[in-house]
Image (cartoon, rainbow, N blue to C red):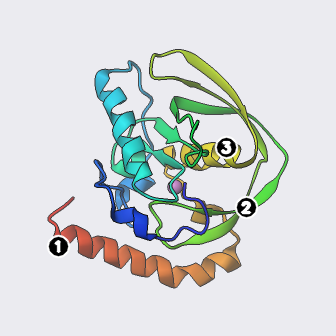
């Protein structure tokens, strides 16, 4: 998830991202990720690389493995990344167990650069997951953390925030989405990526 406004800033290019963030239009973003049955060093490395990739974007506060082209149920979140004592969360096989309330907030996404939209979601969630050592976690989240968890869990199910916004608002986004899709296809063919 990207903090709003999801705009590129001058700090974005200071660091090289270890992983390539997939952009709207790439089919992997619509696929369902698979649970991790045994946590390996490869998964720990993936979590590290995902955090490093997220931190190269000045407004990145959450990233799902799907967004780097890996269909594993792993997400990273750091909603306090600008604080000195920020503590990134790595959640493996996250599952939202309880939801309550309703709140509307503007969201952005690193896979949808320069696009934001108002999304209504449950205000509070309880999520269970495993940490990188395989220890069970149970987190009660509200506000931006709740928002980020829901946004990233959606990615694991192939859902993007634009699927959840009001149809009228979505209509005004169609042109920008089509352009993004075109650009992402062009970028991939120019760079020989798949
Ligand atoms: Ni996102």
Which sits in the foreground, 131 or 15?
A: 15
Res 13 → quadrant: bottom left
- Tell whether circle 2 marks a residue whose Cβ is less than 8 angstroms from ligand 1: no
Give x and y (percent) for residue 77: 54, 42
Q: Secondary structure at mark 1?
A: helix
In the image, what residue occupies the spot 51% across and 71% down?
Answer: 7
| Residue 46 image position (x, y, % from top left) | 34, 35
Foreground label between 1 and 3: 3
Q: Which mark is residue 145?
A: 3
Dot 3 surroundings within 10 Å: few (below 14), some, or many (20 or more)? many
Q: How many marks?
A: 3
Which residue is depicted at the point 35% across and 49% down? 68
Q: Considering only order in the chain, which callout, 2 or 3, is on the residue closer to the N terminus?
A: 2
Q: Is residue 81 left or right of residue 18?
A: right
- Circle on res. 190: 1
Looking at the picture, tell me which residue is in the foreground, 186 or 91. Answer: 91
Q: Residue at x 45, y 22 (%)?
A: 132
Residue where numbered disc 2 is placed: 105
């Amino acid at each position: 998830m990207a903090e709003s406004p999801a705009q590129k800033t001058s700090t974005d290019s200071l660091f090289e991202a270890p992983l390539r963030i997939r952009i709207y239009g790439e089919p992997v973003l619509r696929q369902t990720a698979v649970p991790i049955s045994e946590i390996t060093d490869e998964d720990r490395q993936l979590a590290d690389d995902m955090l490093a990739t997220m931190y190269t974007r000045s407004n990145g506060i959450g990233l799902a493995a799907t967004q780097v082209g890996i269909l594993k149920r792993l997400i990273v979140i750091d909603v306090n990344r600008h604080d000195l004592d920020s503590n990134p969360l790595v959640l493996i096989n996250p599952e939202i167990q309880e939801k309550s309330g309703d709140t509307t907030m503007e969201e952005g996404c690193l896979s949808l650069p320069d696009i934001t939209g108002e999304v209504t979601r449950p205000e509070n969630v309880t999520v269970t997951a495993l940490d990188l050592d395989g220890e069970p976690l149970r987190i009660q989240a509200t506000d931006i953390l709740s928002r980020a968890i829901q946004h990233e869990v959606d990615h694991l199910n192939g859902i993007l925030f634009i699927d959840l916004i009001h149809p009228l608002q979505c209509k005004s986004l169609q042109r920008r989405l089509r352009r993004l899709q075109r650009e992402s296809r062009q970028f991939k063919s120019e760079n020989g990526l798949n």
